[in-house]
Amino acid sequence: MLTLYVSLLLSNDSIETVYIIIFFITFLDSFANPASSALIPQLVLEENLLKANSLMSSIHQFIQMGGWAAGGILAAFLHSNGLLMLTSTLYVLSTFLLAFVKVKEKKQSEELEELSVKESKMTSMFEGWRLIAEDKRLRVLHLTLFFGSIASPVWVSSILYPFIDKRLSVGTEWWGYINTSLLLGLFLAGILAYRQSEFINKNIQIVLLLGGFMVFLMTLLFGVNVNPILSLLLIGLYGLFEELRMISIHTIIQSLVREKLLAKIYAVQSSLIMATFGISTLIMGILGQRYSIVVVFIVASISLCFSFIILITSRKYLTLTVDESRNKFENQF
């Protein structure tokens, strides 16, 4: 629709329609991450969950790294209409390939079926929130994600551009270098987790705690740093440990929650992260404008420090084996 509208009907008086269509694109696209994350446990064995998450992460980060460069080149050659047509074609191809993904539906217990019949639609809508609120392990993990989302706006361009200009005193091309270093760290973490999946599975609590601490430390050091070269190293290390942390969190959640409930958990997670990110972006922008860009990074570091404290004080909830976690969770719900 966007491609056809821009190609045939766009005018200066109808630009608002473009924003409406883009809103619906992002609205529909927001279903993709919860759905794909919930789908992974249905496609691989439990012992291969971390490896599967790592592989998905590596592919995603590789595309992200190549996408920035390829997108700019394609925009120069194809211009806006050609780029939109290519994007539409890729969506059609993606839909076609998804048709080959076959998932065998697992038969639910009679008790669960009876419960789902009795549930009202409104109750079903809030079930994901209820599950997270009532289970300590899920609550700890999502509190960690919540504080991480408060800190994440420091990496958006509206914060990084002033930081590069005023703190590092270098040209705006360094925004590209910093982004590349971040994505490289994320990509390497995916490869590392894939190759060392067995070790990480056995020491997932340690990996999660180390990741939480290093993400806090790298954010703090990056914010007070004035050396451009060192900033590339710091943000690369941030990306490495942030991705290891997130892979560990997703693996624990997928191991803990029944497949039928995973989509609801991830839908809540997506809503929580996006809402927190949006509000925090506004607040961080105000802090940066009123005080200084360093204050923004210090606030982000404090938030990540809270996230780490929650993890280390609640680490007993992250030591269960996959089987024990799943059985206890199913008995509880």
Image: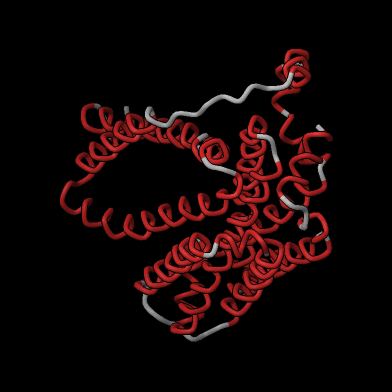
For the N terminus, give its image quadrant.
top left
Answer left or right for 219 relative to 125.
Answer: left
Camera-side residue: 278 or 192?
Answer: 192
Q: Quadrant of residue 331?
A: top right
Q: Which residue lies at the image location 39% right of the left edge and 32% below the top edge?
A: 98
Q: Which residue lies at the image location 79% right of the left edge and 66% below the top edge?
A: 312
Q: Which residue ends up furthest to the bottom in the rendered image?
A: 227
Residue 325 drawn above or below residue 58: above
Camera-side residue: 290 or 91?
Answer: 91
Residue 103 drawn above or below residue 192: above
Answer left or right for 190 relative to 73.
Answer: right
Display coloring: secondary structure
Residue 52 drawn above or below residue 264: below
Q: Is residue 291 visible?
A: no
Q: Which residue lies at the image location 32% right of the left edge and 29% below the top edge?
A: 96
Q: Quadrant of residue 181?
A: bottom left
Q: Which residue lies at the image location 49% right of the left edge and 71% below the top edge?
A: 162
Q: Quadrant of residue 210?
A: bottom right
Please state the horizontal and vertical placement of residue 141, each as a whole percent of the image. Answer: 72, 52
Answer left or right for 153 relative to 130.
Answer: left
Residue 103 drawn above or below residue 137: above
Please state the horizontal and vertical placement of residue 201, each as a whole percent of the image. Answer: 63, 59
Q: Is residue 171 visible?
A: yes
Please state the horizontal and vertical placement of residue 123, each as a whole percent of the image. Answer: 76, 22
